C-alpha cells in the first residue's frame, strides 16, 4: 500500500515521522476523510474547503493550494489497487522541541493514506443500529476537524460498550451530533437537523442530505432540536462519509418510532445511492 508523506509516495512501512511531531505529542493538527467511489473522490472541493476552515481554526497555513491538493490526492488514489477508498488526510504543525508555543519556521507534516472503503451492506441498512445518548462534554470548537479526538473516542466507546453503533450527544438539553457522525430527526414526515455552529462538525454527508431533501421536495427544517424531540422522534439517522445514511432504531434501549428503519430513511438512502451513482460512475 502506497501512502503520501511530505511530498513523497512510499510504502506504508517506510512512512515514518519523528516522535517530536506535534501531532504525536500534542494532537496539534487537523484531518479530513474523503470517500472515493470508483477512484473518484466524492465532493473533494467541499472537503478541501472544510480542511481550509480547520487549518484557519488552528492558525496553521495551508501547505498546498486546491490544485496542489487535488494533484497529490488523485495520484494517491491511482496508486491503490482497490477502487472504492476511504482517503485520510492529516496536517500537523510539524516537528519541533516540545513547547506549547507555535514553532517558528517549521514545515507542517502532511500525511495521506487510503484504505478500502467499507460501507454498510443493504442487510445492515435494513436492520438499522442502536445508539446511546451522552452529555456532549467536548470543547467549544467542534467545527474544527481536529486530530485530537480523545473526547469523541471516549464518547463513542460508551456506545461500543453497550453493543451499539453510535453515541448521540446532547449539550444543554439540545442535540449536537454523533461521536463520529451527524444526527437527523424525523417527526410527522419533517426532516430536522441542528444548525451548523461551533458545537458540531458540519458533515459533507449532512450537506448532501439537506440538498437532496430540498431537491426532492422533502419537508425539512434546520433548527435547534431538544432532547425531548430526539426521544420522541419517528425516525433518527446518523450520517457520515463512511456510514452514509444509517437508521438508528433503538436509543438508550427504547425503540425509535416503529423500531425499524422508517420510510423517509429508506427514501433518502435510495436518493443518496442514486446521487452517488450519477456523480461518481457517470
Ligand atoms: N467523521 N461529526 C463528527 C464528529 C465526525 O467525526 C464526522 C465524520 C461527521 C460527519 O462528517 P462527514 O459527513 O463529512 O463524514 C460529523 C469521519 C468519518 C471520521 O472521523 O472517520
Image (spheres, rainbow, N blue to C red):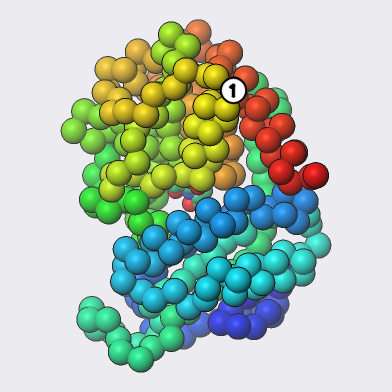
Residue shown at 35% from the left, 88% from the top: 96
Query: What is the quadrant of the C terminus in the image?
Result: top right
Q: Nearer the viewer, residue 164 or 209?
A: 209
Is any atom of residue 80 visible in this view?
A: yes
Confirm if mark 1 falls within 8 A of ligand 1.
no
| Residue 242 versus residue 218 in the image, above or below | below
Position of residue 118 measured from the top left corner of the image (x, y, whole percent): 67, 45
Specify the quadrant of the image occupied by residue 148: bottom left
Is any atom of residue 160 visible in this view?
A: no
| Residue 11 versus residue 261 in the image, above or below | below
| Residue 206 versus residue 145 in the image, above or below | above
Position of residue 41 measured from the top left corner of the image (x, y, whole percent): 67, 55
Q: Nearer the viewer, residue 37 or 147?
A: 37
Residue at the limit of the structure toward the bottom, as seen here: 105
Specify the quadrant of the image occupied by residue 222: top left
Q: Is residue 21 left or right of residue 212?
A: left
Q: Which residue is mark 1?
A: 216
* Callout 1 secondary element: loop
Q: Nearer the viewer, residue 25 or 6?
A: 6
Query: What is the quadrant of the N terminus in the image?
Result: bottom right
Residue shown at 30% from the left, 89% from the top: 104
Q: Is residue 131 left or right of residue 12?
A: left
Amino acid at each position: 500500500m502506497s501512502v503520501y508523506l511530505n511530498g513523497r509516495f512510499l510504502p506504508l512501512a517506510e512512512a515514518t515521522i519523528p516522535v517530536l511531531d506535534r501531532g504525536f505529542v500534542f494532537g496539534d493538527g487537523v484531518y479530513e476523510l474523503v470517500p472515493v467511489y470508483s477512484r473518484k473522490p466524492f465532493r473533494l472541493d467541499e472537503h478541501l474547503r472544510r480542511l481550509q476552515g480547520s487549518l484557519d481554526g488552528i492558525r496553521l497555513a495551508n501547505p498546498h493550494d486546491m490544485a496542489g491538493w487535488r494533484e497529490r490526492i488523485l495520484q494517491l488514489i491511482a496508486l491503490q489497487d482497490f477502487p472504492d477508498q476511504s482517503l485520510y488526510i492529516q496536517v500537523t504543525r510539524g516537528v519541533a522541541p516540545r513547547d506549547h508555543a507555535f514553532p517558528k519556521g517549521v514545515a507542517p507534516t502532511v500525511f495521506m493514506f487510503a484504505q478500502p472503503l467499507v460501507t454498510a451492506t443493504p442487510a445492515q441498512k435494513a436492520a438499522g443500529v442502536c445508539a446511546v445518548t451522552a452529555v456532549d462534554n467536548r470543547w467549544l470548537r467542534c467545527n474544527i476537524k481536529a486530530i485530537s479526538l480523545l473526547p469523541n473516542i471516549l464518547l463513542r466507546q460508551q456506545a461500543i460498550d453497550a453493543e451499539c453503533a453510535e453515541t448521540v450527544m446532547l449539550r444543554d438539553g439540545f442535540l449536537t451530533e454523533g461521536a463520529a457522525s451527524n444526527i437527523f430527526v424525523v417527526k410527522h414526515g419533517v426532516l430536522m437537523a441542528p444548525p451548523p455552529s461551533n458545537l458540531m462538525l458540519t458533515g459533507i454527508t449532512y450537506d448532501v442530505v439537506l440538498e437532496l431533501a430540498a431537491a426532492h421536495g422533502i419537508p425539512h427544517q434546520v433548527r435547534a432540536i431538544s432532547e425531548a424531540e430526539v426521544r420522541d422522534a419517528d425516525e433518527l439517522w446518523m450520517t457520515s462519509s463512511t456510514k452514509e445514511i444509517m437508521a438508528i432504531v433503538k436509543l438508550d434501549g427504547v425503540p425509535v418510532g416503529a423500531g425499524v428503519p422508517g420510510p423517509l430513511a429508506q427514501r433518502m438512502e435510495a436518493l443518496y445511492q442514486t446521487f452517488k451513482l450519477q456523480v461518481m460512475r457517470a
